[in-house]
Image: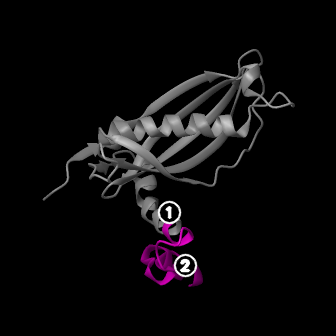
């Protein structure tokens, strides 16, 4: 049976937050844990929009903090499903920090998160296939299988020799 298809653009979410004193560390920068919380919420909404289901976070890839986000900054998070598998979905998220008085805006974070759609009992449930349309969406979609295999290998859920997409990538690099 063919899976239902949904455009990845239908999962797009934009969230905006103001960095308040309670969100900051002693250097008046947004705390990393608070940033990760915001990223998880934004990305989960994208996964829910795509699947129309309850979702749980399965993994977060390599969150690096490029720039500190100062007290009073406006944080904008944008997320979208890049690809779906049987019950899991990869979500890409970008985070920008804006200092309105100075008129500056910087990209502070980027990450991939994986969510699993579950039924009312918490068991994984099938999700629609994600359909990319723009060149950027296609590029993210195409890389998602390699990122998934890397996550599975690093998590001990796939043997390295089974990661055919990764082997093909590294085979290309050796030539």
Nearest to N terminus: mark 1 or mark 2: 1
Position of residue 132 in the picture relative to residue 17 (left or right): left
Q: In the rendered structure, which segment of residues is drawn in magenta?
A: 152-175
- Res. 124 in view: yes
Q: Residue at x 61, y 23 (%)?
A: 17
Quadrant housing the N terminus: bottom left
- Residue ranking furthest to the right: 27
Number of numbered labels in the structure image: 2
> In terms of secondary structure, where does tag 1 sit?
helix
Q: Is residue 12 left or right of residue 70?
A: left
* Point 46% across, 63% down: residue: 148
**Measured along the vertical axis of the image, is residue 88 above or below residue 107?**
below
| Residue receiving disc 2 | 170
Is 88 displayed left or right of 155 in the figure?
left
Q: According to the image, label 1 marks what residue?
A: 147
Residue contact between numbered discs 1 and 2, judged by CB atoms under 8 Å: no
Q: Residue furthest left?
A: 1
Quick one: quadrant of the C terminus? bottom right
Q: Is residue 125 above or below residue 142?
A: above
Q: How is the image coloured?
A: one colour
* Residue 107 visible here: no
Q: Is residue 159 magenta?
A: yes
CA separation, marks 1 and 2? 13 Å
Instruction: Farthest residue to the front: give it.
Output: 121
Secondary structure of residue under mark 2? helix
Residue 106 highlighted magenta (yes or no): no
| Closer to the camera in the image, 125 or 43 | 125
The nearer-to-camera label among 1 and 2 is: 1
Residue 31 is drawn in which quadrant?
top right
Magenta region's main secondary structure? helix
């Amino acid at each position: 049976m063919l899976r239902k298809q949904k455009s990845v653009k239908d999962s797009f979410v934009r969230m905006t937050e103001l960095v308040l004193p309670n969100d900051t560390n002693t250097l008046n920068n947004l705390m990393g844990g608070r940033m990760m919380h915001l990223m998880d919420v934004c990305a989960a909404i994208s996964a829910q929009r795509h699947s129309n289901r309850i979702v749980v976070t399965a993994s977060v890839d390599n969150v690096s903090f490029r720039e500190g986000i100062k007290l009073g900054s406006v944080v904008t998070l944008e997320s979208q499903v890049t690809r779906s598998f049987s019950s899991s979905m990869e979500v890409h998220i970008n985070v920008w920090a804006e200092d309105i008085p100075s008129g500056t805006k910087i990209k502070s974070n980027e990450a991939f998160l994986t969510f699993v759609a579950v039924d009312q009992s918490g068991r994984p449930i099938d999700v629609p296939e994600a359909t990319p349309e723009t060149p950027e969406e296609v590029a993210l979609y195409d890389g998602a299988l390699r990122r998934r295999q890397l996550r599975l290998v690093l998590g001990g859920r796939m043997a390295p020799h089974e990661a055919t997409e990764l082997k093909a990538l590294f085979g290309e690099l050796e030539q």
